[in-house]
C-alpha cells in the first residue's frame, strides 16, 4: 500500500533538507579551518617586525656612541698637544692680561707701575696686590731691560703714565711649542703670539 501523496511529498522535503544540511556542515568547517590559521599568521610577523626594529635601534645607538668617542679622540689630538697646549696658551693669556692691567693702572694713577716675573719660582706680581703662579710644567724665559730688574733672576717691565714702557718679552714653552708675550717699549702695547722658533 503506497503512502498518500501528501505524506510522500513531506517525506521527500525532509530528506532534501537533510541532504542540504549535510553539505553545508563540511563547508562551514572548511571555512573556519582556513580563516583561523590565516589570522594567526598575520599577528606573528608583526611581533617579529617589532623585535627587529628594536634590534636595529640598539645597533644605531652603539654606532653613534662609537662615532662620538672617535671624534673626541681626534679633537683632543688636534688641540695642539691636548691639555698641555691648552695650559700653555691659557698661562700666556693670563700674563698678557696682567701686563695690560699694569699699563692701564699706570695711566689711571699717573704713576709708574711694575710687573715682575720670577722664572725660577714660576710666579708673577702686578700692582694692587695681584700675584699668581705659572704651572711648573712650563718653561719661562724673560727678555727685558736689566736696569729695572728688582733682583737677580727676576724680570720686570715698568709702565709709565703716558702708556710707554721699558719693553720686554715673556716667553712660555713646553714640548717644542711656545707663546711670546711682547711689550713694545714706545707704546706699551701688549701682544700675544706663537713663538716662531723652538726654545
Image (cartoon, helix red, strand yellow):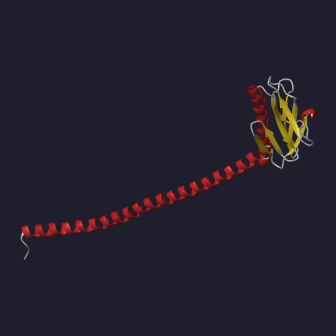
Q: In the rendered picture of this protein, how many numbered marks are placed on residues?
A: 0
The residue sitting at 88% across, 47% down in the picture is 120
x, y percent for residue 186: 86, 23
Q: Nearer the viewer, residue 125 or 69?
A: 125
Q: Nearer the viewer, residue 177 or 74?
A: 177
x, y percent for residue 98: 77, 36
Q: Nearer the viewer, residue 138 or 76?
A: 138
- Of all residues, the one furthest to the bottom in this rendering is 1
Q: Is residue 41 left or right of residue 83?
A: left
Q: Is residue 50 left or right of residue 164?
A: left
Quarter that holds the N terminus: bottom left
x, y percent for residue 61: 60, 53
The residue sitting at 77% across, 36% down in the picture is 127
In the image, residue 9 sits, relative to residue 71, either above or below, namely: below
User: Where is residue 17, by image quadrant?
Assistant: bottom left
In the image, residue 16 sits, relative to residue 126, either above or below, namely: below
Q: Nearer the viewer, residue 154 or 198?
A: 154
Quarter that holds the C terminus: top right
User: Where is residue 167, by image quadrant?
Assistant: top right
Q: Is residue 132 left or right of residue 176?
A: left
x, y percent for residue 6: 7, 67
Amino acid at each position: 500500500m503506497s503512502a498518500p501523496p501528501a505524506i510522500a511529498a513531506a517525506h521527500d522535503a525532509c530528506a532534501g533538507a537533510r541532504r542540504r544540511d549535510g553539505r553545508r556542515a563540511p563547508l562551514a568547517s572548511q571555512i573556519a579551518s582556513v580563516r583561523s590559521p590565516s589570522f594567526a599568521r598575520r599577528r606573528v610577523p608583526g611581533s617579529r617586525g617589532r623585535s627587529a626594529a628594536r634590534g636595529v635601534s640598539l645597533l644605531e645607538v652603539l654606532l653613534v656612541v662609537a662615532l662620538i668617542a672617535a671624534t673626541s679622540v681626534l679633537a683632543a689630538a688636534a688641540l695642539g698637544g691636548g691639555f698641555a697646549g691648552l695650559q700653555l696658551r691659557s698661562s700666556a693669556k693670563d700674563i698678557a692680561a696682567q701686563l695690560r692691567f699694569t699699563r692701564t693702572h699706570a695711566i689711571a694713577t699717573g704713576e709708574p707701575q711694575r710687573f715682575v716675573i720670577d722664572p725660577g719660582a714660576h710666579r708673577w706680581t702686578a700692582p694692587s696686590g695681584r700675584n699668581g703662579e705659572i704651572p711648573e710644567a712650563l718653561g719661562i724665559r724673560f727678555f727685558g731691560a736689566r736696569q729695572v730688574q728688582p733682583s737677580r733672576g727676576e724680570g720686570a717691565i715698568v709702565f709709565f703714565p703716558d702708556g710707554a714702557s721699558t719693553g720686554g718679552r715673556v716667553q712660555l714653552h713646553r714640548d717644542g711649542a711656545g707663546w711670546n708675550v711682547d711689550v713694545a717699549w714706545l707704546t706699551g702695547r701688549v701682544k700675544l703670539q706663537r713663538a716662531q722658533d723652538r726654545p
